[in-house]
Image (cartoon, rainbow, N blue to C red):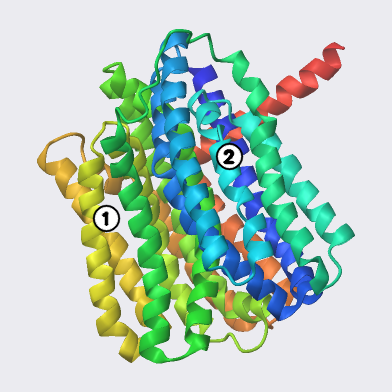
Amino acid sequence: MAGNKKRIVKNYIFNTSYQLLAIIVPLVTTPYISRALGAEGNGIYSYTYSIVSYFVIFSILGTATYGNKQIGVLQDDPVARSQKFMDILTFRIITSGSALVLYIIYVALFAQNKGIALIQALYLLATLCDTAWFFQGMEDFKRVAVRNYAIKLLNVAIVFIFIHNPDDLWIYVLMLAGLTLVGNLSIIPYLKKYLVSTKGYTPKPFNDFRVVLQLFIPAMALQMYEMLDKTMIGVITGSAAQNGYYEQSNKIVKMALILVTALNTVLLTKSSKAFAENRVDEMEEYLYKSYRFVWFLGIPLMAGIIGIARIFVPVFFGDGYLPVIQVLSIMSLLFIPIALNSTTSTQFFISTGRQAVYTNCVLIGGAVNVAMNLLLIPHFKASGAGIASVAGEIVIMLCMLIYIARNNYFKVSKIFTMSGKYLVAGGIMLAALLFASAKLPLKVWSLVLLIAGGAAVYFAVLLIEKESFVLSGISFALNFIRKKFGKKNGQ
């Protein structure tokens, strides 16, 4: 069990660190790229990438999540997992190949910047070659993470060495799309470690098409709702600035959410395997640990963003973004419902094959979001869209938990009773941050002081409360240090 826990922690670190790197790299390169390529160059890239993204979404469908789950269930059966890999890979080749053909037709007939648009087609080839879902199912997160670290760092180097003016746009697009393809190709040789011969086996790519489609619909719906939020803000307010306030707030919240939701990708494999082997108690244990983790990190992130918003927004975004303070504070309320929804959907509905119920919950929540946008955006603009987003996620959460409670799958009340210590610590942290923020100047050092101080207050209160995650973390760190120093002394 100790080895199992160590593997979960290790995989979480690998998965989270890469996703954070995927956010940090654009933050480092964006100011330079904005100046080097100019507004027109960036606009061409942004538009052509948005078009190819639609084709990529349809080429993937729901195979990434489905593949992770299925390989996780079959990871101890080399023959069965190899056959399932062939099924999913064949399906991905068919969908990606079809999307690529349609995209080429689009480029030939409709694209304005045909050269750049054609280079973007490399993303579809990269999707066709993507096998990261298999390694995630085998819980080999290190393989994927190391590949991604190398690609992202190479990305930064190429940007600063080769991109200097608007004429270099094609190099920039080729670099981004090409490195994605190279990265996906680079891990294919490692498949032989896990796959065995399937000679004589005929792949059945469409056997589980209904399940794959059920996973695709909610993912696509959530993306569409986010796009609709921005569209409705623009149409109703007629203000590009309001869309900017919403976009910047959404960007910060989604970036921080990675810390809370990354554990679900790691535990999807274990939950699916436990359910398939009828180890229900073990699956529930993973669920409750994940819910506790949501409260443990979600509450301080929510309280922290509200507490530092007054200084964070002008320091990070600069002048002209003061309305983001209110919008960001509202959207920080998304941390808990989104993270709870991610845990429930990934580790219960998807793990147990109840994708249809999950889809219905997402559609209901999305309808509420759109309806509230119509009511609130005319009066509160970007803040109204933020309130609507929070309401939509809460409705999704309630739909899923009501279904679980009615069918007695596990105790829903336990999810909320475990939040007590974190709410107390988060409340004290928020009060301290609001008091300090009101006294400090709008400086970078003030922001650093607030973040460090807020974290110190939160963990100090949890330590006083003898909270299990904190005590376990301290114990794990001390044991790690002892082993490291013990080895050195032994040598």
Residue at figure coordinates x 27%, y 31% from the top left: 352
Circle 1 SS class: helix
**Which of the image's four quarters has the C terminus?**
top right
In the image, 240 versus 415, the foreground residue is 240
The residue located at (31%, 73%) in the rendering is 388
Q: Residues within 10 Å of mark 2 (few under 14, many from 20)?
A: many
Mark 1 and mark 2: span between their CA atoms? 25 Å
Element on which disc 2 rests: helix
User: Residue 217: percent from the left, percent from the top?
Assistant: 31, 50
Amino acid type, label 2: Asn
Residue 93 in view of the camera = yes
* Residue type for callout 1: Val
> Where in the figure is residue 411, as x and y percent of width and height?
20, 38
Q: Quadrant of residue 414?
A: top left
Q: Which residue is mark 1?
A: 362
User: In the rendered image of this protein, does residue 55 appear above or below residue 390?
Assistant: above
In the rendered image, the vertical position of residue 487 relative to residue 122, given as above or below: above
Disc 1 residue crowd, few under 14, some 14–19, many 20+, Cα 10 Å: many
User: Looking at the image, which residue is at 69% across and 61% down?
Assistant: 26
Q: Which of these two is toward me, 116 or 185?
A: 116
In the rendering, which numbered label is found on residue 15? 2
Q: Quadrant of residue 355?
A: top left
In this view of the protein, can residue 466 be seen by the observer?
no
